[in-house]
Image: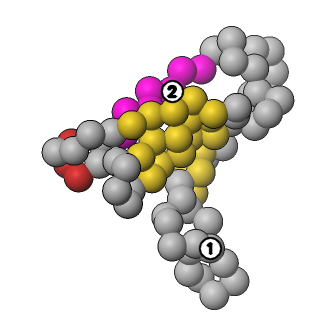
Amino acid sequence: MDFMPVGFDGKPPSRHPELHRQVTCTGGKVRMRIDFMVRFDYAAGETRIEELRHGIFATDRKEEVATLRARPNSSGT
């Protein structure tokens, strides 16, 4: 399920839009792969990507930021 969270006023909770994806496995194990290929300014500029403890942080070093985060108990296998 994909969704964009909003506050009680119907507006985004921050000035940065968020897209959330929830994946639920109802039985057994499922292999999952996500390709996170961020391109800012229509790929005209440089994108810097850093690995974080529970995700990835991408920036154009000017004003654009994107993050990909998984729950701490998610398996990386």
The residue located at (33%, 39%) in the rendering is 47
In the picture, the disc for residue 24 is none
Q: Is residue 37 magenta?
A: yes
Q: Residue at x 59, y 51 (%)?
A: 20
Tell me where the magenta segment starts and ends, as one range: 32-38
The amino acid marked with disc number 1 is: Pro
Q: Is residue 23 visible?
A: no
Residue annotated with mark 2: 34
Question: Callout 1 environment at 10 Å: few (<14), some (14 to 19), or many (20+)?
Answer: some
Q: Tell me: residue 39, above or below residue 77.
A: below
Out of 22 and 73, give the one closest to the viewer.
73
User: Going by the image, does 3 lie left or right of 73?
Assistant: left
* Image height of 49 relative to 8, above or below: above
| Residue located beneath label 1 in the image | 13
| Circles 1, 2 touching at the beta carbon (< 8 Å) | no
Q: How is the image coloured?
A: secondary structure
- Along the line of sight, which residue is nearer the eye, 29 or 75? 75
Q: Residue furthest left?
A: 44
* Secondary structure of the residue carrying numbered label 2: loop
On-image quarter of the C terminus: top right
Which of these two is toward me, 70 or 28?
A: 70
